[in-house]
Image: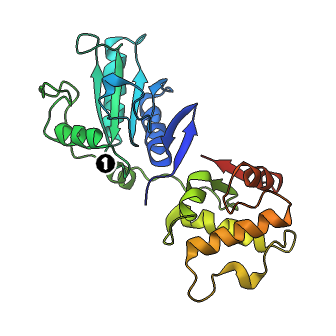
């Protein structure tokens, strides 16, 4: 299943990458500024497609000192990024740190190649030069970092967020697990809630022989009919606005 996309600080990323960046910022003890995020196909020619998928981010270090730039790269590597300082001498770009989240499910082909080059202790550029960053973290991943630095679990609260990407996926796919599967279940349960009453409790599961994605479309159509919205079977802006009125948070 693909990573869950979100917009964070006006930058398109995914939830896993954001969690990694937050951990790296804690190590660096300051917030990063972003030049480019993920899912930016064709956005920056010099990126050579590495930002077409997920897990990629460019961090602005133009105004930072050489020591600060190295510290940014080190913090990112410590949490599982393949990260390098990029300089104007290397290409037509300003000083920035280019980072790829190792193990991201949405990596573009170019980004995946850069991860392999990083593990071979190279610089990830076309010249395949020697790695010029702080060594010692080539085998690090986010999952390994988390085992050594577990994130405190906050008190349980009802989750009221709905991912638009999950809703689009639910319309055409049957198997959904993890956070996206929970989002689909949350929408269906909401539709069956007595205060909503768009479907009955018996309609929360598909009938025998009916696939989940068709069932989900049917639930959305029933909600749209109930609230006199255009009946499309698609979780669109109208549906998002409706669920916001019920206290739900809609994410990308």
Front residue of this view, candidates 186 and 42: 42
Residue 125 visible in the snapshot = yes
Q: Residue at x 39, y 52 (%)?
A: 146
Q: Is residue 91 left or right of residue 206?
A: left
Q: Quadrant of residue 167?
A: bottom right
Q: Quadrant of residue 235?
A: bottom right
Q: Position of residue 234 (x, y in %)?
A: 66, 59
Q: Is residue 172 left or right of residue 119?
A: right
Q: Residue at x 70, y 58 (%)?
A: 160
Vertical relation: 38 (above or below) 1: above
Colour style of the rendered protein structure: rainbow
Q: Position of residue 101 (x, y in %)?
A: 35, 42
Q: Residue at x 73, y 85 (%)?
A: 202
Q: Tell me the crowding category of disc 1: few under 14, some 14 to 19, or many 20 or more residues within 10 angstroms, Cα based.
A: many
Q: Position of residue 110 (x, y in %)?
A: 26, 38
Residue on which the image places disc 1: 141
Front residue of this view, candidates 24 and 87: 87
Q: Residue at x 73, y 67 (%)?
A: 221
- Label 1's element? loop
Vertical relation: 141 (above or below) 40: below
């Amino acid at each position: 299943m693909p990573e869950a996309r979100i917009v964070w600080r006006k930058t398109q990323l995914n939830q896993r990458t954001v969690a990694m960046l937050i951990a790296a910022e804690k190590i660096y003890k300051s917030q990063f500024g972003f030049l480019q995020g993920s899912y930016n196909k064709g956005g920056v020619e010099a990126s050579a497609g590495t930002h077409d998928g997920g897990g990629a981010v460019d961090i602005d270090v133009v105004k930072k000192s050489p020591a600060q730039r190295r510290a940014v790269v080190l913090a990112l590597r410590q949490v599982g990024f393949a990260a390098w300082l990029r300089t104007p001498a290397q290409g037509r770009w300003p000083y920035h740190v280019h980072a790829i989240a190792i193990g991201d499910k949405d990596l573009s082909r170019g980004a995946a190649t850069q991860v392999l080059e990083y593990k071979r202790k190279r610089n990830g550029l076309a010249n395949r030069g020697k790695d010029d960053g702080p060594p010692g973290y080539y085998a690090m991943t986010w999952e390994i970092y988390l085992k050594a630095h577990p994130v405190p679990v906050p008190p349980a609260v009802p989750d009221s967020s709905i991912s638009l990407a999950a809703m689009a996926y639910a319309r055409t796919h049957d198997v959904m697990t993890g956070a996206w599967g929970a989002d689909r279940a949350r929408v269906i349960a909401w539709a069956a809630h007595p205060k909503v009453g768009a479907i009955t409790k018996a309609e929360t599961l598909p009938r025998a022989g009916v696939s989940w994605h068709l069932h989900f479309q049917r639930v959305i159509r029933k909600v749209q009919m109930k609230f006199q919205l255009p009946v499309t079977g698609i979780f669109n802006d109208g549906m998002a606005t409706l669920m916001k009125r019920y206290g739900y948070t809609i994410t990308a």
